[in-house]
Amino acid sequence: MSELKRNLMGTVAAGEGFPVAILNRNEPAFYCVPARAFKAPLNRLEDAESNAVADARAGEAVVTQLMAYELSFLDSALKEWRKLYAQTQD
């Protein structure tokens, strides 16, 4: 704990990107986890949750219909955009 008080960032840097156990009387008081090391498992958890939602919705008709509607809308919007572009080139 006294080393931590003297040089916080040096103590964290000593872990070289890995979590550092902060001891108080030779017992872990807390763990200092660098941001990158902290975010990595959170990102994996978020990805797993997103995949589970996507898997659960994969066969839903509503999703299929919505995607078909969106694609037809995008197709018609693209055609209109091309017409407008052609008019500006004349």
Image (cartoon, rainbow, N blue to C red):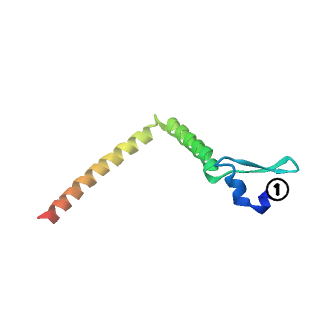
- In this view, which residue lies farthest toward the left? 90
Q: Residue at x 61, y 46 (%)?
A: 42
Q: Nearer the viewer, residue 84 or 18?
A: 18
Q: Is residue 34 left or right of residue 59?
A: right
Across and down, in percent, residue 12 comes to: 70, 54
Q: Residues within 10 Å of mark 1 (few under 14, many from 20)?
A: some
Q: Is residue 63 left or right of residue 4?
A: left
Q: Is residue 1 above or below residue 26?
A: below
| Position of the N terminus by quadrant | bottom right
Across and down, in percent, residue 24 comes to: 85, 52
Identify which amino acid the numbered label 1 is placed on.
Met
> Could you say whether the residue bearing mark 1 is in a helix, strand or loop?
loop
- In this view, which residue lies farthest toward the right? 25
Across and down, in percent, residue 77 comes to: 27, 54
Q: Nearer the viewer, residue 86 or 62?
A: 86
Pointer 1 residue: 1
Q: Nearer the viewer, residue 13 or 60?
A: 13
- Residue 9 lies in quadrant: bottom right
Across and down, in percent, residue 40 comes to: 60, 46
Q: Is residue 57 above or below residue 26?
A: above
Q: Is residue 87 left or right of residue 47?
A: left
- Residue 46 lies in quadrant: top right
Q: Residue at x 88, y 50 (%)?
A: 25
Q: Is residue 19 left or right of residue 63?
A: right
Q: How many marks?
A: 1
Q: Residue at x 63, y 48 (%)?
A: 37
Q: Residue at x 70, y 57 (%)?
A: 10
| Position of the C terminus by quadrant | bottom left
